[in-house]
Image (cartoon, helix red, strand yellow):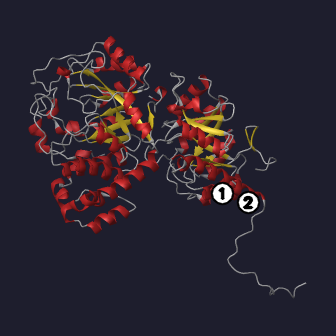
Amino acid sequence: MNNNDPLIIAGKEFKSRLMMGTGKFPSHETMAAALEASGCEIVTVALRRVDLTAPGKDILDFIDRKKYHLLPNTSGARTAEEAVRLARLARAAGLSEWIKLEVIPDPRFLLPDPVGTLEAAKILVDEGFVVLPYINADPVLALKLADIGTVTVMPLAAPIGTNRGLITKGNLEIIIEQARVPVVVDAGLGAPSHAAEAMEMGAAATLVNTAIAVAEDPVEMARAFKLGVEAGRKGRLSGLGSVRFEAEASSPLTGFLR
Amino acid sequence: MNSFLEELEKHDIKALAGSASAFSTANVKAALSSSHVGLREFLCLLSPAASDMLETLAQRARSITLSRFGRVIQLYSPLYLSNYCLNNCLYCGFRKDNPMERKILPPDAIVKEARFLFDQGFRSILLVAGDDPETCGLEYLREAISSIHEFLPSVSLEIGPQSQENYIELRKAGAEGVVIYQETYNRELYKRLHPEGKKRDYAWRLETPERVALAGFHRVGIGALLGLGNPMEEAVALFLHTSFMLKRHWKTRLTISFPRMRQASGSIKPLNPVDDRAFARIICAFRIAFPDVGIVLSTREEPRLRDGAVRLGVTHLSAGSRTEPGGYLDPDQRKEQFHVEDGRSPAEVVEMLVSNGYDPVWKDWEAVLV
């Protein structure tokens, strides 16, 4: 990847534009190997899965904190209040001040609550957290979150775990167009080509979990997503040609005009 | 807001279950390729025509489970508090008229049992008690929950139905989930099987999951005890109940279970036994109909079946369970609710999961969320 093209979040530079989630893997060892193959630097972990009482048996033991930037997430929180409590717990336990904010009242489709997310983000930003909110692809919400000081917005491509790709594409384009903070396309990316497309559209990064974790070979799939993200980013930076639906006439009708 | 009881009464469950016999293999294939599995498609999956397509159903169920839940199985353990019960459910070892020795754990014993489970790795505990508010009332339960919630993030309850107000108190004490099985959705049969006690009240029990959700619990488990009523009818009613809860109480995470009745000492034999193939088909049909709902399988089932069912769609397993109060530190089969069929230790169940390519998850909850 182009070393002169870092991803910058809250003043911190990252070389990789692929972030990874840590759920659904067949084992911690496979997860660790997939993280390595993906080249990712930011790794999100559900706080509800972390066992702060049993050091030595935990998912965190498989994530090298010197190598990866830990991004605890608040999955499991249904309300702003619950998300704030989880974030405070993460900070108190010394895990991180960076929080992937997830406020998800609907356990079925796992869609985020825009109102609760905004409320929690306000509180957490005020308390000094570095907040990366997971949101639906809602351009106005993305603007409001950036206004209050979140360091990214993380709109979904499709509902978590569905592998359906960029079904919110129209709104993602608007969010990217209006963005003042990095836009990380999160959730629903089912194939490396989806990640490449998100990057070609101008996303700053993508976050992938299910598509890698449940692949037949998670490690090779992690590598494939790494390549997809890099290809999409290079395509974006290299000036993609516009899509044409009609051939351009070699003898233009307006050629006589001076 | 209408209740599930009103919803259930709109349907002729017997007729719906009977209508499944009209479906052909082509109907089953169409149901499998449908983007939405409604009642009609569900009936197709459980129809006689689908019985020869069990492998196809299993493959579909597995694929759905993998994409929604990944290769992850949640582990939990029951902790029996008391075998005192004022009900006389004819199929249950704890029933009032069964002359078994009764025991209720004092507070220090609850903590000791919970510590034992904690040391084995468990972080999710299901507190189970017979229905006797005299000995095992609100105060006792609140104390039990709060004493172990200090070190166990996920505490859920399988106790007699409570009022919404009581459920709010129990949630505030630290419980995050409630499991309440209807046993049988067949009202006439329900009446015959529950001759005595508060449990005679079919509607009070049927509407319990709604009170649990309204009390703000994060999770509720529903189900039917297979072996009592006609299994096809029970499956149809549970389908309707699951659909109702998902639509009406959409913030509450739902798990479902279909425990198969085991004859306990002093209780009746199963009235409608469900064989392994029929049981597997029920698991597959529910997974295909409800991709996002957790499916729980206890140690009532033998190892061979549990190991196979994990690959179909089960997402939550208990392990190393004892079904008598105090059974982990002071085992006494004479006080059991039923005898478990899978006697493997938690470590052995973990070994099985790992060797099958699954990640056993002990902790999937955080105490501050309650």
Residue at the image point whose x is 10% and y is 21% from the top: B99
Determine which quarter of the picture holds residue B162: top left
Q: In the displayed image of the protein, which residue is found farthest to the front?
A: B355
- Mark 1 highlights which residue? A196
Instruction: Find residue B70 and report its horizontal and vertical position in percent.
Output: 46, 45
- For mark 1, give the secondary structure: helix
Q: Is residue B271 left or right of residue B348?
A: left
Chain of the residue on which disc 1 is drawn = A
Chain of the residue on which disc 2 is drawn = A
Residue A235, disc? 2
Residue A101 in view of the camera: no
Marks counted in the figure total 2
Residue at the image point whose x is 19% and y is 46% from the top: B274
Residue B272, disc? none
- The three-letter code of the residue at mark 2 reads Gly
Q: Which one is nearer the viewer's eye here, A238 or B198?
A: A238
Instruction: Find residue A156 and report its horizontal and vertical position in percent.
Output: 57, 50
Residues behind callouts 2 and 1 on a single chain: yes
Residue at the image point whose x is 62% and y is 27% from the top: A95
Label 1 Cα crowd, 10 Å radius (few <14 / some 14-19 / many 20+): many
Q: Which one is nearer the viewer's eye here, A112 or B215?
A: A112
Q: Which one is nearer the viewer's eye here, B241 or B55?
A: B55
Residue at the image point whose x is 20% and y is 27% from the top: B337
Determine which quarter of the picture holds residue B149: top left
Q: CA distance from mark 2 to mark 1?
A: 9 Å
Q: Which one is nearer the viewer's eye here, A115 or A67?
A: A67
Q: Quadrant of the C terminus of chain B?
A: top left
User: Are discs 2 and 1 less than 8 Å apart at CB?
Assistant: yes
- The three-letter code of the residue at mark 1 reads Ala
Instruction: Find residue A154 and report its horizontal and vertical position in percent.
Output: 62, 46
Q: Quadrant of the N terminus of chain B?
A: top left
Residue A194 in view of the camera: yes
